[in-house]
Image: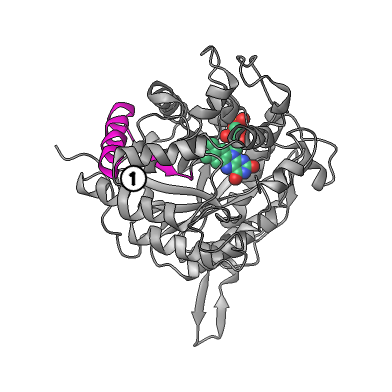
Amino acid sequence: MAPRPLHLGWFTNFAVDEWTKPFTGGGGDPWDGGFYIDMAKAMERACFDYIMLEDTLMISEAYGGSNAVYLKHNIMGPKADPSPMAALIGANTTHLGVVATFSTMAYPPFMLARLCSTLDSICKGRFGWNIVTTGEDLAAENFGMDKLPPRQERYDMADEYVELVKQLWGSWEADAVVRDRATGTYADASKVRPIHFEGKYFKSRGPLNCVPSPQQRPAFVQAGGSPRGRQFAAMTADSIIAPSMGVAGLKAYRDDVRARAQAGGRDPDEIKVLFVVAPILGETEEEAKAKAARIIEAPDYCEKALAMIAAITDIDFSKFDLDAPLPHLTTNGEQGSLDAFQQAGSGKTLRQLCADQLSRGLDGLIGTPDQVAERMGEVMAEVGGDGFLITRPFTANISRQYITDICEGLVPALQRRGLARTSYTEGATLRQMLREF
Ligand SMILES: Cc1cc2nc3c(=O)[nH]c(=O)nc-3n(C[C@H](O)[C@H](O)[C@H](O)COP(=O)(O)O)c2cc1C
């Protein structure tokens, strides 16, 4: 039996491209968006489902109590706003899904609903919203709060928020725009209604003041990791994205969110779970291993790795001994990413945990395109589906060279095995694309 193809996404952000190595195109100055338009075009040639623009709303000071490491190594910042970038990508591609991250903490629901609707129209039905609740106190301070609400409450707010914005997207019936030249009527007023939403946290009158977009609502992407976050993701997302945590961990995660969806009355097949991986490729296995070694043996590798983990967990990892096991840690920030990193009970030293992050928690992804494609197929056969979310190797900046490795090396190797899409369905929306297989 032919294997089911995998869904492929790419997790990136509107941030600094590679600027320190011999092969650097943009040289760390991607702010006119051209670099990411080129990337999206390369991904479209490779028939990816979607590009996802991650976002956070602060310059971290979590590592060592200062922003110095973050600014020096451009870690988790500087970052530019994903929404104009998403519009540019949409306007410069034809088939690729375009997902941008907007936080329920940061955007008033009405603004978010309008923004997503406008982007979905610009992207002709290919837009997705990565729903995040924000996990950093410093970001909360940028929005007038002293600190983040606890996770439980953030997700309770997000439940209500999503309900509200769905109602706003439904405040115009799909056929409300009539453009009737005979009567000179643009929109039929009987099909556009206020929502009068009044919840515990949010209140909005409606209707939305923009027309229904091709998908009516964007595709929903979410990355819940904690039990509460998984529940939210299972009940909401069209595509769930998750850190890799060994094959058994991948399977357990996917089984869990699918069971939660089923219990909540959703068809679990409507949800595509994509696991984050960062393959490292070479013409030979030795070449790939040498590339990996160059990253991992760099003197500042652990500092950069720990600064990244610190930024999304608000835990100061500069305080721990690199050559001792880590105590078990919890956070009000990204618990799922922390758990994937800390591998509780493994007894590994902090230095080993950093090394394990290189290809993001799944082994066997350093080799030739054929070797890595084979491994990805085996892993998915064991896990049961649905696909992968490519990202750059830990601590590395994104480069044209890496994009070429993936789009011109790995994806064709997957395609040769029937493991990746080789064409798009004309006119498919992002949600339709996700449900094709
Ligand atoms: C692949 C991936 C991408 C994520 N992207 C973002 C992001 O762009 N912005 C953000 O604030 N959080 C992001 N997160 C964090 C999640 O939204 C979520 O908070 C995290 O996975 C922890 O789960 P929890 O909220 O259930 O603890 C991401 C997580 C993962 C695994």
Whether ligand 1 has any atom under 8 Å from the Cβ at mark 1 is answered as: no
Q: Considering depth in this image, is 130 or 34 the residue closer to the camera?
A: 34
Q: Is residue 100 visible?
A: yes
Asked if the stretch drawn in magenta spans residue 375, the answer is: yes
Q: Which residues are magenta?
A: 368-392
**The furthest residue to the bottom:** 182
- Residue 367 percent across, percent down from the top left: 32, 38
Compared to 240, does 412 lie above or below?
below
Q: Main secondary structure of the magenta part?
A: helix
Asked if the stretch drawn in magenta spans residue 263, the answer is: no
- Residue 92 percent across, percent down from the top left: 46, 70
Circle 1: is it few (<14), some (14-19), or many (20+) Cα within 10 Å?
some
Q: Considering depth in this image, is 165 or 302 the residue closer to the camera?
A: 302
Residue at the spot x=53%, y=16% of the render?
Answer: 348
**The furthest residue to the left:** 1
- Picture quarter with the N terminus: top left
The residue where tag 1 is placed is 282
Q: Secondary structure at mark 1?
A: loop
- Residue 381 percent across, percent down from the top left: 27, 30
Residue at the spot x=65%, y=66% of the render?
Answer: 209
Amino acid at dot 1: Gly
